[in-house]
Image (cartoon, rainbow, N blue to C red):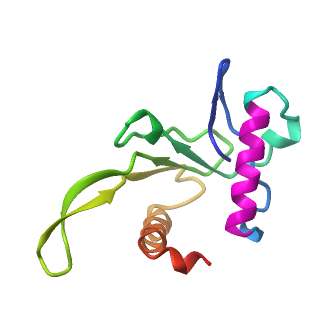
């Protein structure tokens, strides 16, 4: 699911079978569902069957936040803004780089913390090396 803010509150349209889609197909579905959510054209099937939600508040200059799992979903990923920050590189030298904070909230009746940790590790690797996603 992708959290979409609308005048009436928050909607979470679902990208069904996202694991079988390419990144381009997922992006197209996100754009379509977001547009239909904002124009009140979602159907009930668009809101059912979600297991995992992505919520992004980066566009509001929010660095980090804790998102709440919406049952019956298993988890939600909170995405903060990407901002330029000082970091230490592999050579122990300071440098400026874009950094974003990602936080996962999970229903531990469905998924355990070790699985969440592996997911975040895989996500970090993919974001740091986008070619891995292709």
Q: Is residue 4 magenta?
A: no
Which residue is at a point 17% across and 66% down the rendered structure image?
95
**Along the viewing direction, whichever of 112 and 45 lies nearer the viewer:** 45
Q: How many numbered discs, if any?
A: 0
**Along the viewing direction, whichever of 56 and 31 lies nearer the viewer:** 31
Taking 6 as reference, is 58 left or right?
left
- Could you tell me which quadrant the C terminus lies in? bottom right
Residue 86 vertical placement versus 45 (above, below): below
Q: Where is residue 133 in the image (x, y as percent from the top left)?
A: 58, 75
Which residue is at a point 36% across and 54% down the rendered structure image?
100
Which residue is at a point 50% across and 73% down the rendered structure image?
130
Q: Main secondary structure of the magenta part?
A: helix
Q: Where is residue 12 in the image (x, y as percent from the top left)?
A: 69, 38
Q: Does the magenta stretch include residue 27?
A: yes
Which region of the structure is painted magenta? Answer: 22-37
Q: Where is residue 28 in the image (x, y as percent from the top left)?
A: 74, 55
Residue 85 vertical placement versus 21 (above, below): above
**Along the viewing direction, whichever of 28 and 117 lies nearer the viewer:** 28
Which residue is at a point 46% across and 71% down the rendered structure image?
118
Taking 82 as reference, is 108 left or right?
right
Q: Position of residue 116 (x, y in %)?
A: 48, 62
**In this view, which residue lies farthest toward the left?**
93
Residue 45 vertical placement versus 110 (above, below): above
């Amino acid at each position: 699911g992708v959290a979409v803010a609308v005048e009436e509150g928050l909607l979470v349209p679902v990208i069904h079978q996202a694991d079988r889609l390419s990144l381009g197909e997922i992006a197209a579905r996100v754009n379509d569902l977001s547009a239909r959510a904002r124009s009140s054209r979602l159907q009930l099937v668009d809101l059912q069957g979600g297991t995992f939600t992505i919520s992004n508040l980066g566009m509001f200059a929010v660095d980090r936040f804790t998102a709440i799992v919406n049952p019956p979903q298993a988890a939600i990923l909170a995405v903060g803004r990407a901002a330029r920050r000082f970091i230490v590189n592999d050579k122990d030298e300071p440098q400026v780089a874009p950094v974003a904070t990602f936080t996962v909230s999970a229903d531990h009746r469905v998924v355990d913390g070790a699985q969440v940790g592996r997911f975040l590790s895989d996500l970090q690797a993919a974001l740091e090396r986008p070619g891995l996603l292709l």
